[in-house]
Image (spheres, rainbow, N blue to C red):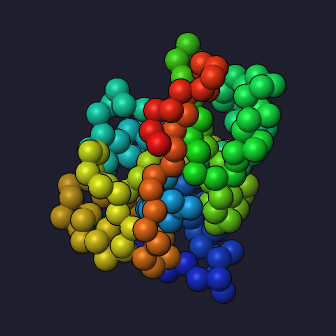
Amino acid sequence: MQILKIENLNLDEVVRKSARAIKSGQVIICPTDTVYGLICNASDKKTVSRLFKIKKRPANKPIPIFVKDIKMAKKIAEISKKQEAFLKKAWPGALTAVLKSKKNKGTIGIRIPNYKFILTLIDKLNLPLAETSVNISGEPSLIKIKEILRHFEKQKHQPDLVLNAGNLPKSKPSKVLDLTVWPYKILRS
């Protein structure tokens, strides 16, 4: 695992290196506006499969997608005018919206994070990112960088790159709302 420290002075360099890593099929540990997350190219099935192995997440339990704006969200999900009006008030922020997927007849969880680094990265890549919290499935989320590094050092499946922004403030994962029904249904508060 390569480790890059994120600082304001080297933000452009870290974005460039992260974009290169994601384009080459790597999985990255990255700070978000809530907790540290595992991210990768959402359209690269092989890399998404690796992300599931790293997290030890059951394959039938989907993971959300980070997008940079509603326009990008509309490319992968069906969004009505009512849903769009709601999302414009809620995004960017710690809200994952479950919407009808354009790819299949299922649903997809989408979020626009309120975090400059990730938004800059998505903008540079111009593609959605698969994302999930850094923890083994079913265990608590991790916000302290030393715990994260210790956690993965002995794992069989490891991320390729760690973006170290230091310890994050204590926070909860995003709220998850099912917007395929109206009024919406809270799946995780």
Q: Is residue 105 left or right of residue 60?
A: right
- Which residue occupies 37% across, 74% down? 145
Q: Position of residue 155 (x, y in %)?
A: 21, 58
Q: Nearer the viewer, residue 176 or 136?
A: 176
The answer to whether residue 177 of the structure is visible from this angle is yes
**86 over 184 or under it: above or below:** below
The answer to whether residue 42 of the structure is visible from this angle is no
**80 over 173 or under it: above or below:** above
**45 over 102 or under it: above or below:** below
Q: Where is residue 102 in the image (x, y as percent from the top left)?
A: 65, 21
**127 over 167 or under it: above or below:** above
Q: Nearer the viewer, residue 12 or 30?
A: 30
- Which residue occupies 58% across, 68% down? 17
Q: Residue furthest bottom?
A: 9
Quadrant of the rendering where the N terminus is positioned: bottom left
Q: Is residue 145 left or right of residue 171?
A: left
- Which residue occupies 59% across, 83% down? 7
- Which residue occupies 77% across, 25% down? 82
Q: Which of 171 and 142 is in front in this view?
A: 171
Q: Quadrant of residue 46?
A: top left
Q: Position of residue 168 (x, y in %)?
A: 46, 72
Q: Position of residue 88 (x, y in %)?
A: 77, 42
